[in-house]
Image (spheres, helix red, strand yellow):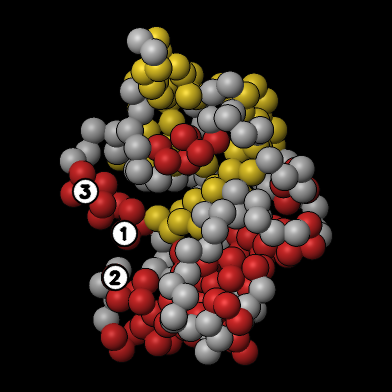
Amino acid sequence: MKPVIKTVSIKRVFKSGGENVYALNDVSISVMPGTFVALRGRSGSGKTTLMNILGALDRPTEGQVFFEGTEIGELPESQRDELRRRKLGFVFQASALIPLMSAYENVEFSLRIAGVPAAQRRKRAEEVLALVGLSKRMKHRPMEMSGGEQQRVAIARAMAHNPSVILADEPTAQLDSRMGLQIMKLFRDLVDKEGITIVMATHDPIIMEVADHVYTLEDGKVVDEQEQRSKAL
């Protein structure tokens, strides 16, 4: 089995006061299909920069990034847009739901943007909301839902178009510990039961209990790599 995502000695350099600042320095990671991979580290460790490169939102200064065997760092922007639209799902700190739309409408709208035919959108929206445990909350708007429920809608939206990988950047940062644990468990269940590949950036120590593989970043470098045996929560 080949990695769905692989980076080879990538660097990301920014200019500050005429000097080079390395947000990432010689980072090599691999993400296998159907696994839960964590990027762990404190704020400023390089997690978000790496997530942006994995998600084709940014390009490395040096090194290579492979997605399903294709080197994406030098692809034209139109092909990178298509990659993000078809192959990737994103979950961020804030759920970024459209306030005036219900949970169902938020998910259905994302499918419309992805070009899914109208006949399939309703079925798929209902299906993914059921997967995240929100069948009974589909008609509720974000303001009528808890923070944890809003993130569940965001996760449903991210997976609705059947992406190869979901990238989650600090998705529990704005949640209390109980809701954060629920989101972690949901990710673990989606990997185990649906075969979804998830890459999550976090500083939450709970990740050590649920991830299959953990990369710890510090000052833009991978300082530790651990193969995990995830424990049921």
Looking at the image, which residue is at 73% across and 51% down? 210
Looking at the image, which residue is at 77% across and 48% down? 206
Q: Amino acid at mark 1?
A: Arg
Q: Nearer the viewer, mark 2 or mark 1?
A: 2
Q: Amino acid at mark 3?
A: Gln
Q: Label 2 belongs to which residue?
A: 113
Looking at the image, which residue is at 23% across and 33% down? 74
Q: Are marks 3 and 2 in contact (CB under 8 Å)?
A: no
Q: Amino acid at mark 2?
A: Ile
Q: Which mark is residue 162?
A: none
Q: Looking at the image, tell me whether mark 3 or mark 1 is earlier in sequence order.
A: 3
Q: Looking at the image, tell me whether mark 3 or mark 2 is earlier in sequence order.
A: 3
Q: Label 1 belongs to which residue?
A: 85
Q: Label 3 belongs to which residue?
A: 79
- Residue 212 versus residue 77: which sits nearer the camera? 77
* Residue 59: quadrant of the picture: top left
Q: Are marks 2 and 1 in contact (CB under 8 Å)?
A: yes
In the picture provided, is 223 more to the left or to the right than 205? left
Q: Looking at the image, tell me whether mark 2 or mark 1 is earlier in sequence order.
A: 1
